[in-house]
């Protein structure tokens, strides 16, 4: 890590602390912090400033919407394309330019961002035992708070290192508070193995910190929503165990599929009564929509486990991803590839074959082979589909905001001369609160970023159990509640396909993709499955719609070509870090 980064991090973390940012994460539930500047000694001289310093670390949890220069990570996958061409994924990931300034916050800024957060965790862990208790706290309360803060710091450090691992692989594990005037990473250039980094460090951190974290009931009290709790540690442990058992990592990690299944099962056993799939609304589409939009505190969404708790959002927060006909900037435009993954409402798959990426088999064409028994009609492609399709994607003819989506050329949402009009024929609906569009876009709503929800735990368990050799009935019955919640009550166990482990594998990957679409999973899933070169180098398909003799005509098209090669499984370590420390870069990226 170059000296300027650590120096900047040091002053942000100590001498130049601005505590107002803490409120952004906790959505106003925590007291607003003072904006004075403090030295390190001043921070840890009293409990109130230590508390503020610790809560500020939560700001290093990132929001996924528009994170990459107003584009989303899923626009760097086969699920979507960004409509506007200025920066973001279109000028970086999609053309294979992993040094692009247009996506710097993701491709190069991640390194600095999380090492700064890690330094704050290390500093808290080093200093908190010597901080005097608050005058109005009992000795017992102070001991509890110290235990919780230390456990939260261990969790956050583990999570930050995990996010770094996804992008850079195993990197130096810095557990000390580095001196900004010293040699920085000169003693941290040896890169650990996957086992040392993930299994021996991250997973152990999560196991060790769980007992010291607050329980779910305490985390729901006023002032606490969004803080790390015991179930969050177990849920993240489940995710990481699944990754470590996956094709890309299993030989190095030594983690088996059965161990990954056991990890998911342990969450369900110990915390399953506190969480579940959100089913509080009367219709399936609304249930799925509100599983994302309703928050875990005052709106009682029991599906959300781990999230970034933000303030109420308005028009400015969704402008970049709202259809141009509504006055927005187009933004995240789902692909036909994703649309093709949604099943029919009767529970059948619209196409005959799906590959190991979860997508239909295209065989070099733009139209997969249709499963005639499903009822899918190429001249009416959106009828009788999985309700999660209309809850996630805006397509032609859907009522939305102050009008009806119309992507015919020259019409409301595809006007001539508007460079931001959808290139795929679709706009995103998921994560976009429609209520904000009310009263000339003056509405507001929570738009907290979900990091883990209960549906993922279900999918983790199904995938791991299937790979571990679980029975067909057990595996499909685990997934069934997700389909039931979506209104697709036909029993998976009665389908004539999904007989072999491989068929179920492809189905589970498809189901995971559509259930968790636009939640920042796809880029990492296809990497851990070792299928990224197939999934992320394929064309992005779209749909042109015209009207002839009063009927809509649907024509598939290639909306964008993509580049993805083996070296892109990992990001290059930022050039400045390589030059400064001579740390070994990732395979395929020259020093």
Image (spheres, rainbow, N blue to C red):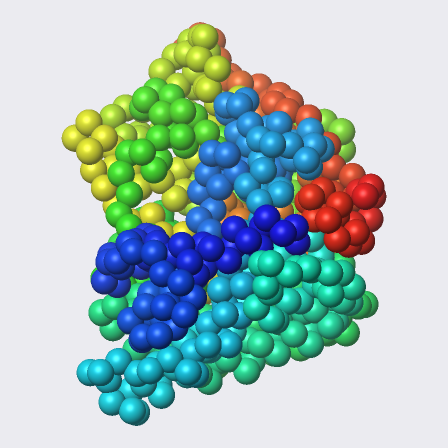
Residue drawn at x 72%, y 27% as measured from the top left: 365
Q: Is residue 563 above or below residue 190?
A: above
Question: Considering the image in quadrants, where does the C terminus appear?
Answer: top right
Could you say which quadrant of the image residue 166 lies in? Answer: bottom right
Residue drawn at x 31%, y 24% as measured from the top left: 326
Residue 491 visible in the picture: no
Residue drawn at x 31%, y 75% as measured from the top left: 47
Closest to the observer: 448 or 379? 448
Residue 325 visible in the picture: yes
Could you say which quadrant of the image residue 320 lies in? Answer: top left
Q: Is residue 259 above or below residue 551?
A: below
Relative image position of residue 93 (x, y in whole percent): 65, 35
Closest to the observer: 318 or 100? 100
Relative image position of residue 178 (x, y in whole percent): 60, 65
Question: Considering the image in quadrants, where does the N terminus appear?
Answer: bottom right
Residue drawn at x 69%, y 76% as measured from the top left: 200
Relative image position of residue 586 (x, y in whole percent): 78, 50
Q: Residue furthest left?
A: 439
Q: Residue furthest front?
A: 181
């Amino acid at each position: 890590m170059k000296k300027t980064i650590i120096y900047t991090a040091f002053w942000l973390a100590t001498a130049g602390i601005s505590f107002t940012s803490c409120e952004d994460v906790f959505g106003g539930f925590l007291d607003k912090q003072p904006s004075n500047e403090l030295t390190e000694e001043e921070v840890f001289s009293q409990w109130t400033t230590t508390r503020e310093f610790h809560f500020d670390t939560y700001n290093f949890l990132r929001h996924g919407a528009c994170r990459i220069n107003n584009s989303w990570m899923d626009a760097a996958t086969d699920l979507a394309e960004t409509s506007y061409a200025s920066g973001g994924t279109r000028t970086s990931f999609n053309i294979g330019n992993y040094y692009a300034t247009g996506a710097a916050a993701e491709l190069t800024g991640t390194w600095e961002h999380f090492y700064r957060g890690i330094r704050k965790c290390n500093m808290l862990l080093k200093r908190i035992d010597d901080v005097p208790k608050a005058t109005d706290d009992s000795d017992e309360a102070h001991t509890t708070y110290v235990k919780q803060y230390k456990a939260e710091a261990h969790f956050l450090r583990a999570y930050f290192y995990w996010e770094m691992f996804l992008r850079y692989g195993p990197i130096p594990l810095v557990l000390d508070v580095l001196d900004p005037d010293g040699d920085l990473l000169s003693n941290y250039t040896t890169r650990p193995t996957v086992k040392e980094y993930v299994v021996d460090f991250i997973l152990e951190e999560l196991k060790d910190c769980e007992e010291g974290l607050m329980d779910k009931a305490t985390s729901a009290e006023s002032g606490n929503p969004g803080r790390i709790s015991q179930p969050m540690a177990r849920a993240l442990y489940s995710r990481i165990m699944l990754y470590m058992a996956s094709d890309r990592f299993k030989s190095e990690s030594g983690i088996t599929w059965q161990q990954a299944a056991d990890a998911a099962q342990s969450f369900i056993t110990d915390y399953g009564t506190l969480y579940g799939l959100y089913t509080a609304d009367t219709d399936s589409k609304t249930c799925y929509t509100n599983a994302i939009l309703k928050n875990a505190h005052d709106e009682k969404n029991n599906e959300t486990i781990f999230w970034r708790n933000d303030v109420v959002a308005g028009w400015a927060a969704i402008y970049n991803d709202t259809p141009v006909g509504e006055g927005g900037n187009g933004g995240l435009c789902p692909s036909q590839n994703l649309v093709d993954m949604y099943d029919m409402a009767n529970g059948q798959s619209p196409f005959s074959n799906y590959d190991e990426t979860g997508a239909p088999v295209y065989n070099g064409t733009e139209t997969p082979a249709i499963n005639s028994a499903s009822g899918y009609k190429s001249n009416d492609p959106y009828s009788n589909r999985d309700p999660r399709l209309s809850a996630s994607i805006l397509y032609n003819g859907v009522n939305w905001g102050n009008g009806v989506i119309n992507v015919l050329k020259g019409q409301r949402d595809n006007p001539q001369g508007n460079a931001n009009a959808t290139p795929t024929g679709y706009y995103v609906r998921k994560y976009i609160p429609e209520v904000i569009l009310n009263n000339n876009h003056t509405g507001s709503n929570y738009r907290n970023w979900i990091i883990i929800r209960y549906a993922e735990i279900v999918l983790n368990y199904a995938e791991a159990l299937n790979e571990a050799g679980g029975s067909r009935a057990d595996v499909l019955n685990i997934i069934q509640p997700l389909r039931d919640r979506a209104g697709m009550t036909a029993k998976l166990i009665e389908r004539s396909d999904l007989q072999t482990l491989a068929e179920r594998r492809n189905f589970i990957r498809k189901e995971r993709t559509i259930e968790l679409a636009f939640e920042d999973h796809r880029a990492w899933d296809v990497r851990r499955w070792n299928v990224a070169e197939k999934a992320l180098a394929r064309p992005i398909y779209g749909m042109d719609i015209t009207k002839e003799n009063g009927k809509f005509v649907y024509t598939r098209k290639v909306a964008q070509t993509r580049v993805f090669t083996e070296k892109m499984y990992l990001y290059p370590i930022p050039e400045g870090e390589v030059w400064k420390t001579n740390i070994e870069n990732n395979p395929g990226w020259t020093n």
